[in-house]
Amino acid sequence: MKKSKRVWGAALFSSLLLAPCIAVHASTEDKYFTNFTISARSFTPVSAPREKSNASSVYAYVTKAGNSVKAQTWACGSTSWNSNLTQDYTGSPTNSVSLDIGYEYEIYNGIYEAGYRFAGLKLQSDNIIRSDVVSGRWSADSIRTSGMIVARH
């Protein structure tokens, strides 16, 4: 009897340790966008909203574009786009931040803190005349690494 309680106790303890890892992994998984056309006049969603598990920054990495791009982080429902909650590097609300090609960015936002559990990323060409074709990846949550840059306006 004592042995079975210890086995069940160990199994329960192990599952409690692994549960947060599984949830974090789901929202930090990169979503790729390839040869995706973005407008010069308005912000374009790069994918459907994604689940957001914590108050971390949104991760974005543009690997191909004609110019740098502007980015917005949106608070979303599972299928709706509700509010632009992008923040600049100081944590103050801003309309958008700039992303240069070839750099990994963390984009500050107030999505999770505002009670939303889905996030969306919208991009716009930095060229005021022409649309652009971009490739890259993003995730709703991020894990800070040494090479990441905080996105600025």
Image (cartoon, grey):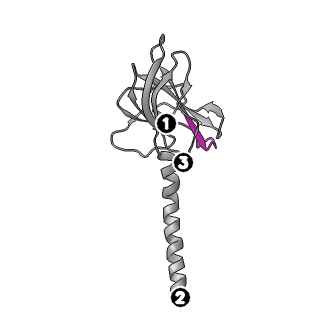
Comes first in the chain, label 1 or label 3: 3
**Residue 59 seen in this snapshot:** no
Q: Quadrant of residue 65?
A: top left
Vertical comparison of 3 with 85: above or below: below
The magenta segment: 105-120
Label 1's element?
loop
Is residue 1 at least partly visible in the picture?
yes
State whether residue 119 is above or below residue 72.
Answer: below
**In the image, residue 44 lies in the stretch drawn in magenta:** no
Q: Residue at x 54, y 72 (%)?
A: 12
Q: CA distance from mark 1 to mark 3?
A: 12 Å
Q: Is disc 3 placed on a helix, strand or loop?
A: loop
For label 3, the residue is 54
- Mark pair 2, 3: CA separation: 39 Å
Which quarter shows the N terminus?
bottom right
Amino acid type of the residue tagged 2 in the rendering: Lys
